[in-house]
Amino acid sequence: ILLLGVLLVGFVSWNPTQAFAIIGQQPVRSKQRELFRLGASEEKHEERGHDVGKAPAPGQLSESEIQLQQALAKHQENAPKLGVTEEVRSLVAYNHGYAVMSTISKSDPGFPGGSVVGFAPDEKGRPLFCFSSMSTHTQDLLADSHCSVTIAAREFKGAADGRVNLMGTVVPIQEKDDILAANAIYRAKHPDAFWVDFGDFTWFRMETIHRIRFVGGFARAGRLEPEEYMEAKPDVVAQFGPQIAKHMNEDHSEATIAMIANQIPGLDVSEAQITSVDSLGMYIKVSRTPRASDQYQQFKIRLPFPRQATDRKDVRTLIVGMTKEAAASATTEAETEKGE
């Protein structure tokens, strides 16, 4: 299904029905995976999607373009990806440490209050906070602990990037040992937060997570079970993803383009920017203009590693190997065409 996971990045002249940025899902392995489907309804499991208008008439796409779309769709379906819970835990763990908290306003009954707040997740993925008694969100929480926290991926640039919303109850931490542990976790995330030791600041924790909503990009959204979220662990490589992506984008973008061409023959892209890296592969925002069209396209694809990476050094080993393989393949193809 070519529309699954289409990640259109702001080019309204491009008909999304012609897109082939398929960020598919792994086979369903748990209840939360079953619910995490395109537009799935929790009660009826009814599939809903975006109204993208009429599909293009058969004559609008060349045969070669149709074949390329089908090949890319198959490649993306089979590309290994993190499980949803692991992806969400990684997003929360490796975020820059700031989120939007929405509380039930004490001063304006019936309205939500929004604040940008610092946080750090504990070992179960529950956000920890340190709030001044003067802050309006502190007063809101003391009056009603129900709130939600919206956390965007560290690489967030727009609607094609991931974000998660945690709904639950945020309450003051009471036990001294828990306060000391919260202080250590928070200061590791925010080393310059000297003010957490001021007398008018109080430690809070999202004690109960009621609901988790995740949006992984255009037409990719769903709900997760809090229990599975808290049991999952962040991906060990994702924490280094931004540094790896920055290095590749600044110094080796041509190698990224070559790796794409090697894994997906016929997909000629003019630009390729790695947006995130995890132990199973990379998400890459690519730009292209089809040979039989003047419609500029920009979308995300998944480029998997040949095996799971164990650490940052191992990622380098895998990428070097993929780059050499792509170069050898290109040389062989060039020699074959020359011989013909």
Image: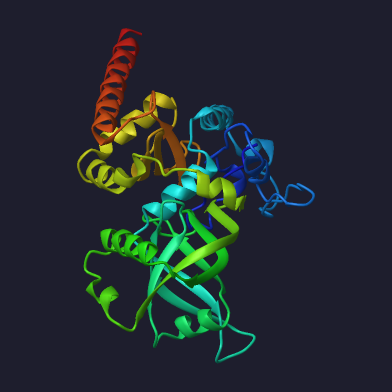
Closest to the observer, 27 or 205: 205
Q: Position of residue 10 (x, y in %)?
A: 48, 58
Q: Position of residue 146 (x, y in %)?
A: 58, 73
Q: In this orientation, does residue 142 appear?
A: yes
Q: Position of residue 7 (x, y in %)?
A: 52, 49
Q: Is residue 228 above or below residue 143?
A: above
303 displayed left or right of 315: right
Q: Position of residue 120 (x, y in %)?
A: 37, 61
Q: How is the image coloured?
A: rainbow
Q: Residue at x 58, y 37 (%)?
A: 25
Q: In this orientation, does residue 219 appear?
A: no
Q: Residue at x 63, y 44 (%)?
A: 32
Q: Is residue 284 above or below residue 180?
A: above
Q: Residue at x 53, y 43 (%)?
A: 84
Residue 303 sits in quarter: top left
Q: Is residue 310 above or below residue 241?
A: above
Task: Find the residue positioned furthest to the front.
Answer: 176
